[in-house]
Amino acid sequence: MKTKLQQLYALQLVDSHLDELQELKGDLPGEVQALEEQLATLGTERTGHERRMKQSFSQRDDADAHIVSLKERLEKYKKQQFAVRTNREYDALTREMDTAAESITRLEKEMEQLEATATIARTQTEETAIKIAELEKLLAEKRAALAEVSKTTEDEELRFTHEREKLVARIAKPDLAAYERIRKAKRGTAVVPVRRQACGGCHNRVPPQKLLELRKNDRIYTCERCGRIIVSDEIAQINVDVV
């Protein structure tokens, strides 16, 4: 159990160092991620605008071709009117001509609507492309700034990350899960030493009986107030290769 407590405390030290290295980067990681998400959203929007524009233009061209065909048919009907011999034939031909004329009128209105839709979509595509270009430029600047900061901490970050991997491999999964849960809830600090008979996290006084039990290093104890894992001075003073 003592080894388990040592490992958990060592993991906390490593994570604290990694958190400090992340803090040196300031808001840059979050800003880069936010810009990447915005770009992904805009990219999807631009694709949608382009698809709508192409579909509208294609449908407009189809309607135009249909109108040309109907007009040719209408001219044919007009010529046929002079050759009909009965009123029934004339009436039938007239109905065909009326139907063709109505279709032409309807298709012309559809063409206007499709043209308007395509024009709006093209404008939206162009506007979105401008926004994307601006964000890509800003993202490149933020990435460069982040890379510059990361370069200064790269060696330390790699060392602590490697040390963390080794510790995680040694800690039992249930203990690791409890550690991660507490760490997430307590802003990165899951394991703290007892300082001056008080919890090193919330500074709540630890009862004398619990202090005696804690010094045995034979089980995991948590602070009654904040829920963090607390360890004895002996565990905290053990020399670990992470500081």
Image: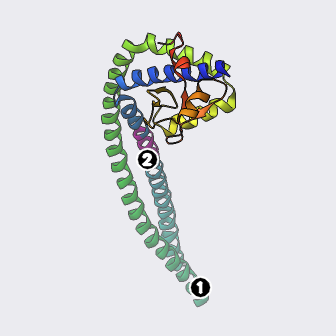
Q: Secondary structure at mark 2?
A: helix
Give me the residue at 43% from left, 47% from top: 45
The x and y percentages for residue 110 are 44, 66
Q: Main secondary structure of the magenta part?
A: helix
In the rendered view, does 217 fall on the left or right side of 158?
right
Q: Secondary structure at mark 1?
A: loop
Give me the residue at 68% from left, 29% from top: 173
Please tell me which residue lies in front, 150 or 47. 150
The x and y percentages for residue 80 are 54, 75
Give me the residue at 56% from left, 14% from top: 163
The x and y percentages for residue 107 are 46, 67
Task: Indicate yes or no whether the magenta region holds residue 42.
Answer: yes
The alpha-carbon separation of the residues under discs 2 and 1 comes to 61 Å
Q: Residue furthest front?
A: 208
Q: How are the colours assigned in the image?
A: rainbow
Q: Is residue 137 above or below residue 64?
A: above
Q: Amino acid at mark 1?
A: Arg
In the rendered view, does 19 fall on the left or right side of 3?
left
Task: Indicate yes or no whether the magenta region holds residue 156.
Answer: no
Q: Is residue 14 above or below residue 177?
A: above
Please tell me which residue lies in front, 108 or 48. 48
- The residue indicated by pointer 2 is 45
Q: Amino acid at mark 2?
A: Glu
Q: Name the image quarter holding the N terminus.
A: top right
- The residue indicated by pointer 1 is 85
Q: Which residues are magenta?
A: 38-47
N-term-proximal mark, 2 vs 1: 2
